[in-house]
Amino acid sequence: MKRLTLITAMMMLALITAGIAQPLCGKGMGKGMGQGKGMMGKVPGYNFYDMNQKELGLTADQLKKLKQIDDAFQKERIDGRAKCQHAGLEMKNEFSKGSINKDALLAKQDNIQKLRNDMQKRALTYKIDLYNVLTEDQKSKIDDIKRECIHQGGMGQGKGQCDGSGRGMGGNWMK
């Protein structure tokens, strides 16, 4: 009886772990949160402009500027993520030492929070920089596109979680 209970518990744990790990997997997921027209917000990101270039009447020069801003931001984002991961590893290593130094851990946590805050500021600056490439007429068209998305139910074509593709909730909007 104990053996059956143990096997059942292990199987349940494996199923729960697989269910939790599934959204965190590598490539090939398919459906999920994606970058589309549908999510409401105030300042759209590059994918919005790329998907709506005809509706907005973007020129080739504007698209080039938008792409340059996006590429520069993506490089900064990658570097910022790496810094956060390094800081997290340092904090993890501090925990694994024989004795826990409270002040050192708190300082490392403060550093992680500072890095995250810096990344959020850079993300907002990025979206504002993209927005400032547009003419006033193009900026007013954004509201029309957003209103149209409300009437369509807020769904947009987008990348799914874990680099899969499929229909997903529209994303890349600042709330």
Image (cartoon, rainbow, N blue to C red):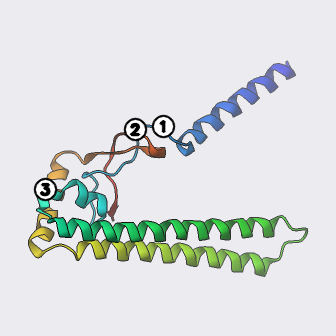
Check disc 1 and report its element: helix, strand or loop.
loop
Q: Are marks 1 and 2 in contact (CB under 8 Å)?
A: no
Image vertical order of residue 6 relative to residue 106, above or below: above
Residue beneath disc 1: 28
Crowd rating for badge 1 (residues with CA inside 10 Å; few <14, some 14–19, many 20+)? few
Residue beneath disc 3: 54
> Extreme left residue here?
137
Of labels 3 and 2, the one closer to you: 3
Image location of residue 110, percent across then percent down: 64, 78
Crowd rating for badge 3 (residues with CA inside 10 Å; few <14, some 14–19, many 20+)? few
Crowd rating for badge 2 (residues with CA inside 10 Å; few <14, some 14–19, many 20+)? some
Residue beneath disc 2: 31
Give the residue type at disc 2.
Answer: Lys
Image vertical order of residue 133 relative to residue 58, above or below: below
Give the residue type at disc 3.
Answer: Lys
Give the residue type at disc 1.
Answer: Gly
Image vertical order of residue 114 relative to residue 152, above or below: below
Calculate the distance from the C-alpha at mark 3 to the C-alpha at mark 1. 30 Å
Visible in this render: residue 152? Answer: yes
Check disc 2 and report its element: helix, strand or loop.
loop
> Extreme right residue here?
98
Indicate which disc residue 19 carries. none
Calculate the distance from the C-alpha at mark 3 to the C-alpha at mark 2. 26 Å
Check disc 3 and report its element: helix, strand or loop.
helix
Image location of residue 52, percent across then percent down: 19, 56
Image location of residue 7, percent across then percent down: 78, 24
Visible in this render: residue 43? Answer: no
Q: Nearer the viewer, residue 158 or 3?
A: 158
Give the quadrant of residue 129. bottom left
At x 39% / y 47%, what residue is drawn? Answer: 33
In the picture, measured across the screen, residue 29 lies left or right of residue 127, that is right
